[in-house]
Each structure stands twice: as structure tokens, then as C-alpha cells.
Amino acid sequence: MRLFVTGASSFVGAHFSSLASREGFVVHGLHRKTPLQLRGVVAVRGDVAGTRPSPGTEVVVHLATKVMADDAREQNRRMLDAVLSWRLPIVYASSTVVHWERQNEYARSRVEDEARVRESGLPYLIVRPCAPYGPRHREHQPAHKESFHTLARMCRKLPFVPVMGQGDYRRQPVHVDDFNGAILRLISAGAWGGEYDAGGPTPLSLRDIIQQLGGKRVLPIPRPVLRVVGPLAGLHSDVLSTFDTDDVVDPGPLAAASGLSPRAFDPGTLANV
């Protein structure tokens, strides 16, 4: 089966493309500026909005997204416009932020785009990762710094890790291979029409995660203060506006549909990032 993967040069996209190739899929990976040289993957350079999928493509896996940009909502809308115009079965990688009671612009764009995928009349899957993590790809370094890699380095190098508030808000980190592997199993089964959340088996507070990564202690920073100084350190205000929201999901339906149970959070995979 031939897959056309958008966002193939991202952290998740590079891991997905490599795993799909190893499992026997023919993979064409769309990348923009960051060079893509993955074993077994055909690199296609271009923008999503200005590109057509490779001839013979059977499924589009839409992983490309913008999060930390002032016009992220508009950029995501334009990319999905293009993908839907190709009129091919689509796997849409959304985000568990769609469930949050307190939503930012990014979350609202995901809600809108999910609705457009459902209404497109195309065969589709919607899969929402919660805090994907994993090792650095051996053949590829994405331009965007992967958040868990940054956190792991902070835990190793700093005497304390700054957190918003007390760090008691929860996440369910999903290993990148579990997320990608579940998608590939659903594609192989032709299980169209499903919508699934992808997360680890157990919710962990940010404090728990930092402790497991070897962080010595946390430095609580009041939310109003971090929202002021965060953008000066490269943290987008839209992300900071909801960062202290719980992100707790049920991974059971995806595990049942794909036959792949998510592993517990494994800090060892981040030891060499």
C-alpha cells in the first residue's frame, strides 16, 4: 500500500515514515525546508498547499500541523483544504486538546478541522495523540525541538525545572511507536470512520514526569508571571494559556481496535536525547 505522509520531517512524522517503510508500506514523505533522508522513504519537497500526492497514492496520512504561530489556525485550515481536495482516504492526526474545557486557538482549529474531515465524504480516521514522546530518530533531526527532549535535557542539566503553578496537571504520554503502530494497523485493516484518543495507560502529573526523568526539584512559577515572561523564552502565549489543563484520555478503544496496547511511560527512551 502506498502512503503519502505530510509533515514527514517532524518528530512524529519521521518516526511514522520509517516504521511504515519497515512494515512494508511504500512511503512518500512530504517535507518543506528540513532535509529528509530516511532509509526506505521517498522524499518529496514542497508545501502541503502547493503539492499533489505522488501517483498511485492510496492513503494520505496528514501529520503536518502548526502549533506555535500567530496564524496557526489559518495555516492549518489551508493545509487541510489541500488535503481534502485530493479526494483520497485520510488519516488525520489531531490532538487530545479538542476535549479540553478551556480551549485556545489551536484547540479550536483542531475541533473545526475534525468536523471538516467528518463532513468530507471521504474514508477517514481521526487519531489524537496525548503528549507523544520517544527517542531521537537515528537518521533525522527535526527543525522543531521536540518538547519531551527539551524537558529531559532540563531535568539532567538544571538544579530545578520551572513549571507553571505546582505542576499537578496531568498528561498521558504515548510512545511514538505505539501511536504510529496503531495507525498502521488500522490502515491495514481498512478500519475507516473511527475516532480514537492515543495515550499511555496511566495519567501522570508533570511533577511525576519530571521526577521519572531525573529532575531534582521543580520551581513553581505563578501562571500570570509565566504568561508574561514565557513568550520572551520562546513559549507561545496561545500554548501557555491552557498549559495547566488536565489532559486525561481513555486509550482503551484504540487498543481494542488496533490490537496494540500502549506501554507505560518509559523515561529510558529519553536518556540520550
Image (cartoon, helix red, strand yellow):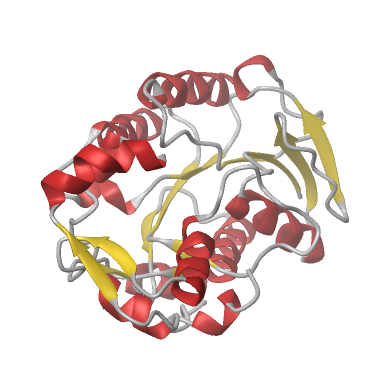
Q: Nearer the viewer, residue 133 or 155?
A: 155
Q: Quadrant of residue 82?
A: top right
Q: Position of residue 184 (x, y in %)?
A: 62, 60
Residue 22 is situated, as x and y percent measured from the top left of the image, at 80, 65
Residue placed at 42% from the left, 22% from the top? 77
Left or right of residue 161, residue 186 in this image: right
Q: Looking at the rendering, in which quadrant would you find the C terminus?
A: bottom right
Seen from the viewer's position, the closer of residues 108 and 205 is 205
Query: How many labels were placed on the picture?
Result: 0
| Residue 223 seen in this snapshot | yes
- Residue farthest to the top, as pictured: 50
Residue 178 placement (x, y as % from top left): 54, 71
In the depicted structure, whether residue 254 falls above or below residue 117: below
Of the pair 166 and 193, the residue shown nearer to us: 166
Residue 268 coordinates in the image, percent (x, y): 56, 84
Is residue 139 placed above or below 109 in the rendered structure? below
Q: Quadrant of residue 222?
A: bottom left
Residue reaching furthest to the front: 159
On the question of residue 203 being in view, the answer is no
Residue at 75% in and 58% down? 18
Residue visible at 76% across and 50% down in the picture: 1
